[in-house]
Amino acid sequence: MPSEAVNESTRREWRELGFFYERDDAAKLWRIVGSAEGLRKFAKLLAAYASESKHAALSEHAHFGPYMYLEIGTWHEPEITDHWIAGPLSDLTSLAQYVQRSITSLRIGGSTSVRSAFAPESPYDLLLELRGEPFDPARGDRECW
């Protein structure tokens, strides 16, 4: 069982990230949960990854979040798997823009699926869930309370 100091550190990392994520293997989806600002941070994370030339080569990747299991990577085609959310940098840039646009059409408590717009043949979906302010992304992580 983690110490309170470790739990507090984990909560701080969620809050710095700005959104909560989890992978649900039974449902075959990644959930990205946040306020409008938190979902914008997710879009910025995607855009920042895609803007770095060091990520141009296939299999390049970066890990995010307290447990570092959210992986954004470079691949020859867009895909969402249990391993990562990946694609050519241009497609990841388009995904970031899609996330930004989706925020404006979502209502608080609503969600939208991304798979059909980004990687229709992928085995996993990416679900964006909008929460109201104030939203604490650390509250989604039952392990750190």
Image (tube, grey):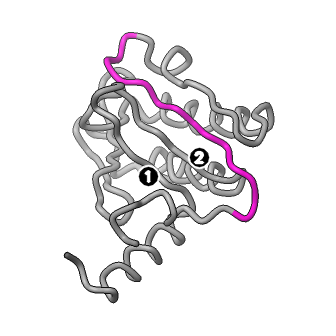
Q: Residue 75, position in %: x, y?
A: 30, 30
Residue 43 numbered tag: 2
Q: Residue 106, position in %: x, y?
A: 75, 34
- Where 130 falls versus 115 (above or below)? below
19 relative position to 4: left or right: right
Q: Which stretch is magenta?
A: 121-134
Task: Give the position of the C terminus as an image quadrant.
Answer: bottom left
22 or 70: nearer the viewer: 22
Quick one: SS at disc 2?
A: helix
Q: Which residue is mark 1?
A: 52
Q: CA distance from mark 1 to mark 2?
A: 15 Å
Residue 133 numbered tag: none
Task: Give the position of the N terminus as an image quadrant.
Answer: bottom left
59 or 42: nearer the viewer: 42
Q: Residue at x 80, y 37 (%)?
A: 104
Q: Amino acid at mark 2?
A: Ala
Q: Residue at x 33, y 64 (%)?
A: 143
Q: Residue at x 49, y 28 (%)?
A: 91
Quick one: SS at disc 1?
A: loop
The residue lying furthest to the bottom in this view is: 5
Of mark 1 and mark 2, the one earlier in the sequence is: 2
Instruction: Residue 131: say if magenta.
Output: yes
115 relative position to 106: left or right: left
Q: Nearer the viewer, mark 1 or mark 2?
A: 2
Q: Residue at x 66, y 51 (%)?
A: 40
